[in-house]
Image (cartoon, helix red, strand yellow):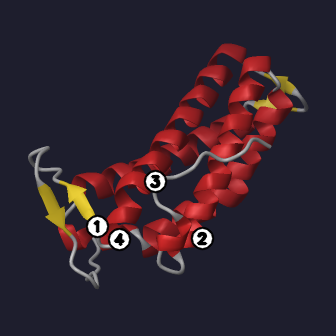
Amino acid sequence: MSTPARSPVPPASLQPGLAQWHQLHQLALARMSDLANALDRQGWMEVDRACRWLHEEFRPHNDREERELLPLLAAVDARPLWRQLRADHQEMGHLTQALLHGHAGGRVHDLGRHGQRARRLLNLVRQHIDTEEHVVLPLIQGQCLPSFETGAGYLMLPAPCAAADYD
């Protein structure tokens, strides 16, 4: 497995509990590097292994984020961010399922489509983790968040956050 990339949020500065999210993000980035290498080699068994890891380990992580972290975005009325992260989780799940079903016994049914889906999943997971590491975790830590309404300025997150549900 590849070495995880460093994150802008130092683990020592994270509140207890958030460090677990950060650590799984780092592991997921390493798995995505492995997925990228497998795609370059057309190593479909390795692609399948990465998708199984996403389904078995990363999907429950995303479910937990939706229950425990994303509601905190209500404290700053960050609905566009909240919606995007939930949409990412849903798309990751759909892509992972499609990839798992499109691969059987080392044989891929539609190479072009399978490769496109795997690349989309790879890019989506990386972008999603980047957003969570650069925006969500600092936001929850009580740091500044760029304004989503104007694209300029900052919204400050008061501590502790009051969570609300957008559903």
Label 4 Cα crowd, 10 Å radius (few <14 / some 14-19 / many 20+): many
Where's residue 134, x and y in %? 39, 52
Give the residue drawn at x 63%, y 56%: 58
Q: Residue furthest right?
A: 105
- Discs 4/1, front: 1
**Residues at marks 3 and 2, CA–CA distance in whole angstroms:** 15 Å
Q: Is residue 155 above or below residue 55?
A: below
Instruction: State how far apart marks 4 and 1 are (Cα).
Output: 7 Å
Q: First in sequence: mark 4 or mark 3?
A: 3
For label 3, the residue is 8
| Residue underneath mark 1 | 143
Q: Position of residue 141 (x, y in %)?
A: 36, 72
Secondary structure found at label 1: loop
Name the residue located 41 percent from the left edge and 64 percent from the top edge: 137
Q: Which kind of residue does numbered mark 2 sit on?
A: Gln
Residue where numbered disc 4 is placed: 140
Q: Residue at x 54, y 45 (%)?
A: 92
Say whether disc 1 or disc 2 marks the residue closer to the N-terminus: 2
Q: Residue at x 72, y 58 (%)?
A: 56
Q: Nearer the viewer, residue 99 or 156?
A: 156
Q: Amino acid at mark 3?
A: Pro
